[in-house]
Image (tube, helix red, strand yellow):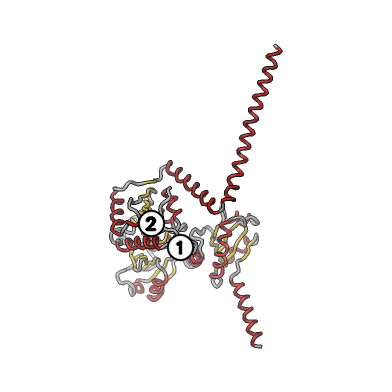
Amino acid sequence: MKLLIYLFALLLGAFQSVASTRVYELSDRFLDIYQEGTWLVKFYAPWCGHCKKLEPVWMQVAQQLAHSEVRVGRVDCTKYSGVASHFGIRGYPTIKFIRGSEFEDTYEGDREREHIVEYALRMNAPVVAPLADPAAVRQLSSKHVLFFVYVGEHEGPLWEAYSELAGKFRAHHYFYSCDENVFQKVDKSVSAPSVVVWKDGRFRPFEHSPSEPHLNSSLYQFVNTERFTRFMKVTAGNFGQLLSTGRLLVIAVAEEDPVRRIPAVEQKFRDMLEAVAIDTADKYSCRKVQFGWVAQPSLVNGVAARTLAVPSLVVINASDYTHYVPDDEPDQLTEQAVMVFLDRVMAGDVQAGGGDSYPMRVYRAVYQARSSIEGMWRGNPILTALLFGLPAGFLTLICYSICCQDIMDADEEDEDYAYHEKNE
């Protein structure tokens, strides 16, 4: 009897586990019901390779969000084109958070479980979540590496500017509010009204004048530049955001294997640059210089339009897409050598490469296209040969037939001319 009860409980648990990880298969009927709940939806096409790669991650996302208000679904856009058209889908896969009539936001981060889940939870939470006591503030400080807090009453120009920016950046970061008397139990140096950011293990305030005429733009600059940690991993999901800051991006180039490991030499080089970032926090303002490392060299290779060595150091000026590479070999770059190089870059003593001119844009596009084809060839040479060989073969046949037709027409005209000339 006990064995039967145990087996029944085991089967029931397995059933609940499967049910809790369910990904809803959505159809045209979704247009009638989507406003009734909160949804995280993947729009895909069965033939899309990126969609297939995302599928196991999507199942994990559904499992982790099973006990939240967010329902996870997917739509086959080749079957239900009306649904894709309604939500403005232009490429695959596209991930959208849908709540009521709001579905304009598209997920643009990394396609990894933890990032997608965090995105869904942020979008489902209030735009600005209140913090009721000092314990809540301290708990967030241990849970998140970066978040923003408004300190003071919910009124005035600073609050209005802050709440507007929270709506703009909520897909990427958490935004909170707190009473002054509560927050001063955590940090007595902050007085209301104020905006602070928690990053690199401490609170950093937004310095402004209450009568500042351009409060919105200065607060935007503060949020846009402070929303990255001092030394961070640069990925496909955040690289575009970093470029929008206009800062100097000081990046260590490394390359991860499929299980996210990097060789010891590259790890040592990465750690050396992280030490520079920490030791020079006061020397290089975080509003001007951003340190980080990249595990996919193709990201920075595409901007530099050249294949950088691994490991190596590259400095990218995000305001004009110029880049700087030191002449020293990677094993000769010490912390002191990196600081000297950065000083020379900021003083204009290092020749820049790249840029944002029209010829450079064309060259960069050609380089990226060539790199993509080479990557396809390394991954699947047979498929790549078919993909590019068949169109080239058809084009060759068309050109050949056109040229041969011209030659045949010319021969017939010559024969007619000779015949008439003979008769005359």
Residue that appears at 48% across and 48% down: 368
| Residue bearing mark 2 | 251
> Which of the labelled discs sits on residue 170, or is there none?
1
Location of the C terminus by quadrant is: top right
| Image position, residue 269 (x, y; %) | 36, 60
Query: Which marked residue is nearer to the observer: mark 1 or mark 2?
Result: 2
For the residue labelled by badge 2, is the local secondary structure a helix, a strand or a loop?
A: strand
Residue type indicated by callout 1: Arg
Compared with residue 63, is residue 362 higher up or lower down, i.e. above or below?
above
Compared with residue 211, is residue 394 higher up or lower down, i.e. above or below?
above
Residue lying farthest to the right in this orientation: 423
Closest to the observer, 182 or 239:
239
| Image position, residue 393 (x, y; %) | 61, 41
Question: Is label 1 in contact with label 2 (beta carbons under 8 Å)?
Answer: no
| Image position, residue 50 (x, y; %) | 56, 57
> Which of the labelled discs sits on residue 402, or is there none?
none
Location of residue 154 (image quadrant): bottom left
Residue 72 appears in the figure: yes
Closest to the observer, 408 or 358:
408
In-image side of 58 versus 332 (left or right): right
Could you give the CA–CA distance between mark 1 and mark 2, rounded to whole angstroms?
26 Å
Residue 157 appears in the figure: no
Location of the N terminus by quadrant is: bottom right
Compared with residue 41, is residue 376 higher up or lower down, i.e. above or below?
above
